[in-house]
Amino acid sequence: MMKRLFIILIVLFCNQIAKSQTEANDGDWKLNNVVLENTQEAEYMIRVGDIDNLNFGWPADFNPFCGKSTPRHKFPWQSISEDIAGMDRILLGSKFNGKGGTDGYSVAYSTDTKPVPIEIKLDKLKQSIIKEVKMQVFIDDFQSLTRKSSFKVTINGKRFIEMEKLLKVMDQTGPIGKLITVNVNPELLPEFSKDKISFLIDDPTTGIGDGFAIDFIKLLVNPKPELIYKGGIKVLVKNQKGQPVDSVEVVVPGREPIKTGADGTCEFNDLQTGLLVLQAYKKNFATFYKNVDVECSKTVQVVLVLNPSKKLIYNGISISEGDKLTLSKIQFSAASAVLSQEAKAELNQIFTFLNTNKGVDIELNGYTSSEGEANYNRELSLKRVEACKTYLVEKKIDEKRIFTAGYGPENPVAPNDTEENRAKNRRVEMKIVRIR
């Protein structure tokens, strides 16, 4: 009873200094479920979870949508019954058993720390044509790089690959919160035509005690092109000697890559505020990842130092980080994700390569020919590379080393005018993500 009273007092105190209010684009921050139509940001805004920084409240004049990290807060803390299950509380991967915790949050281990699906009702979308969805999540203390955790994200049980990629390179040092914005994969958009979605973040495999928390989830359905909260990034890429490196491909999620000029710089403007992961690649250099906070009306200066990439041999070909190879024997019949014997033979070669080079992570990208509906084809291409991944995992390759993505009919390698050419487009490519 005393603990609950203490928590309530903390909440009351924090709310006095918080930016607790009602906003045109977010509704009443104190409510756990809000739906708004035709806001400045989107055709529909749907939010679950109150906007209160895990019940700690916001510092004076702090705007959680403006890209800054919250100050450090105390831990552990108790959840309260008014909060939605799975939100405003410490969560630990479902395989963690309370032993060997690696961060401070792990001391809170109990039945209340198990991740549970968060349901988001979609009644208002019934009559809408859903073209695009952005998901914003205010996350706290994800430390995948440091703790070696491996988070899976699902929507209605289907993998949310783009958010998984972001969380895989997340390193929120200390108990602090940040806003992330992720475009929902096109193959998942049909899920938003259903009565609800069930959203889940979990580490179901490693057993590592990397505790995390979620304050709120906000959907922007059919977002409008003009951003309310935006900032920029100016990037300078150097080599180990401090010299600028030109022609480096710099990637910001949701944007076309930009290459650095002769002075080693490039710039991204009008970016959504919040945390994003910057990626830089040039052949013969190791791919560089950096967490960057994009803040309102600011241009963040970022310096990246590239190191030479290790080189390996695959099937007699010299490869380094960022290289892509077409796996010519992994092809599929129309509308099928069944692996042929020829495909299994090539996957056996990949198994040998990965088993020999245990510091290599790869991405398997699936493509289809152009017959049929685009979203169906994206889902089919994902199923195909998932089948490849499953085959390798069953042969004891760690699943954390294999990313998958389905692109459907995008980037064809041949015209879709004959069956022979369409067969070429039903392909799988392997990208070397990292060589450690």
Image (cartoon, rainbow, N blue to C red):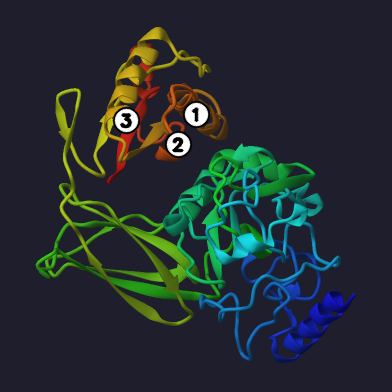
Distance from disc 1 to disc 2, alpha carbons, whole Å, reads: 7 Å
Mark 3: few/some/many CA within 10 Å (<14, 14-19, 20+): many
Quick check: marks 1 and 2 in contact, CB under 8 Å? yes
Residue lying furthest top in this view? 341
Q: Position of residue 327 (x, y in %)?
A: 31, 23
Q: Residue at x 70, y 91 (%)?
A: 17
Asked which secondary structure carries label 3, the reply is helix
Query: What amino acid is at disc 3?
Result: Leu
| Front residue of 39 and 354 | 354
Mark 1: few/some/many CA within 10 Å (<14, 14-19, 20+): many
Which of disc 2 and disc 1 is earlier in sequence?
Answer: 1
Distance from disc 1 to disc 3, alpha carbons, whole Å, reads: 17 Å
Quick check: marks 3 and 2 in contact, CB under 8 Å? no
* Label placed on residue 404: 2
Asked which secondary structure carries label 1, the reply is helix
| Front residue of 285 and 251 | 285
Q: Position of residue 269 (x, y in %)?
A: 38, 71
Query: What amino acid is at disc 1?
Result: Glu
Residue 312: image quadrant is top left
Location of residue 139 with respect to 200 vertically, above or below: below
Report the quarter where the N terminus lies.
Answer: bottom right
Which of disc 2 and disc 3 is earlier in sequence?
Answer: 3
Q: Is residue 224 left or right of residue 290?
A: right
Q: Which residue is mark 3?
A: 354
Q: Which residue is mark 1?
A: 386
Mark 2: few/some/many CA within 10 Å (<14, 14-19, 20+): many
Q: Is residue 294 left or right of residue 60?
A: left
Distance from disc 3 to disc 2, alpha carbons, whole Å, reads: 15 Å
* Label placed on residue 29: none
Q: Residue at x 13, y 68 (%)?
A: 244
